[in-house]
Each structure stands twice: as C-alpha cells, then as structure tokens.
Image (spheres, helix red, strand yellow):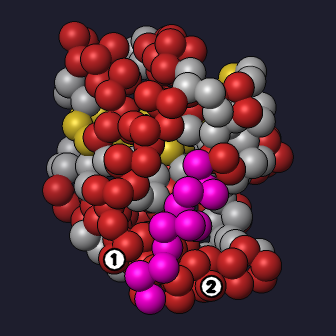
Amino acid sequence: MPFAPDATLVLLPGMACDAELWREQIAALAPHHRPHVANVHTRAESIAAMAELLLAEHPGELLLVGASMGGRIALEAARRAPQRVRGLALLGSTARADSDEMRALRSQAVVEFEAGRGDALLDANVWFVFHRSAWDDEPLLQRYRAMVARAGFAQLIRQNRAIVDSADARAALPAIACPTLVICGDGDAVTPPECSREIAAAIAHARLEWIADCGHMLTMEKPAEVNALLLDWLG
C-alpha cells in the first residue's frame, strides 16, 4: 500500500556526510517523491536536539530515510512523534549505545581532531567504511574523502560527541508501528549486520534486506540496489 501522497520524504545523512551521500538516490526518487535532504546533524549538539529540529522544520507527516547516524535521528523522531512519522527506512544503522571501547575510541578521535591531527584517522577510516571490493574504485573513494573534508574537524567533533552521549534506543523499538525497511551491507564493519538484524526483529513487520559485497557506505557503494529497495518500499 503506498504512503500518503502529502507525506514529506526526508533523507538523513550520516556522520560527516551531506547530500552527496544521496546523489544517486535523489536522482532515482525525484521524479515521483521529491526528497528533501536534511542537515540537522550539522546544526545541533545531540541526537535528541537533531530530531527536534527535524520535526520543527518539516511539519506534517514524514517518511524518514536515515543512513548510519541519520538512522538514529530518524528513530528518535519516530519515538517523539509516532503519529507523524509514517515510514522509516534505516540504512546501515543501529539502535545501540556505544560500547565503552567505542566511546574511548571516539573520545580519542575528538582529541586528535581538536589538535588538528585528524587527517591520518580520516585516511584510515576510508578502508573501514567501504567494502574491500570498493577499495580500487578511486573516483568513489575521492567522492567520500571530499565529502568528509567539507564537513571538517569541528563537525566531526560535535557529531562524535553526540553519538557518545546518545542513549540506547532498543527499548523503544517495539513501539514503532509504521512500515519499516532495514537495509545493511553484508560487510558493514561500522554497524555490523547484527545491529540491523536486532532492529528488524524488534519492530513488528519490519522488512530486512541485505546487500551483498557492501560495506557501511551502501548508498554510494551499491546505489542501484539501494534505489530499487527504496522505490519498492515507497510503493
């Protein structure tokens, strides 16, 4: 059953990402669905504040598509306004709070960014967020590097702190009643497949889809597969 035609479709980028993350999705969705790319993750200090800003700036019924941290924002918006969020698509995301080990890693990264020494971390991160099959695709990797460079260290500091401070959202998942699509790359090393499996198991009638030979940046790595799943979900 298709969603209400007046619901606003909002794409929520992940950490250090912008509309470039959704370039192929915007082209595929635009003829019928007029997607809006939110930038609330660049203008608030916490996941809760990002969700509040999203709800304030996009009135009415919403269809939220969130990648990674964008998925966390979408889940928080759905918790705060379940009557308005009519559909969720969560791509490479998680409802878990960071482990103590991950908090320590993020905190150390923040120290490096504050000292202006984050370039080596960002270079290493490329091999972490992409599946091995994408490592030879230099134009793709350059797109990602340029996007992160646009975000800059200040944005990375704020967003890492927002994730460190965010609460575990798993207890709220069973209350979600809207149609939910969960997509994960089978080689995602940032939010491993068990995170997506956990979300889909907790939300009634959620649909879980895997993308083969794909890492964390699935909208950029496998755009055709992602587009097909989103278009089918949108009815």
Towards the viewer: 177 or 77:
77
Judged left or right of residue 183, residue 15 is left
Q: Amino acid at mark 1?
A: Ala
Q: Quadrant of residue 77?
A: bottom left
- Provide the residue designation for mark 2: 108
Q: CA distance from mark 2 to mark 1?
A: 15 Å
Looking at the rendered image, the quarter that the C terminus falls into is top left
Towards the viewer: 26 or 82:
26
- Which residue is rendered at x = 48% and y = 79% of the image? 117
Q: In this picture, which residue range is highlighted in magenta? A: 115-126
The numbered disc on residue 154 is 1
Residue 210 drawn in magenta? no
- Percent x, y for residue 64? 39, 41
Q: Above or below — where is 142 with respect to 158?
A: above
- Residue 185 in view (yes/no): no
Judged left or right of residue 212, residue 82 is left
- Which residue is rendered at x = 30% and y = 33% of the image? 9
- Which residue is rendered at x = 77% and y = 82% of the image? 100
Q: Above or below — where is 43 with respect to 100?
A: above
Judged left or right of residue 175, residue 86 is left
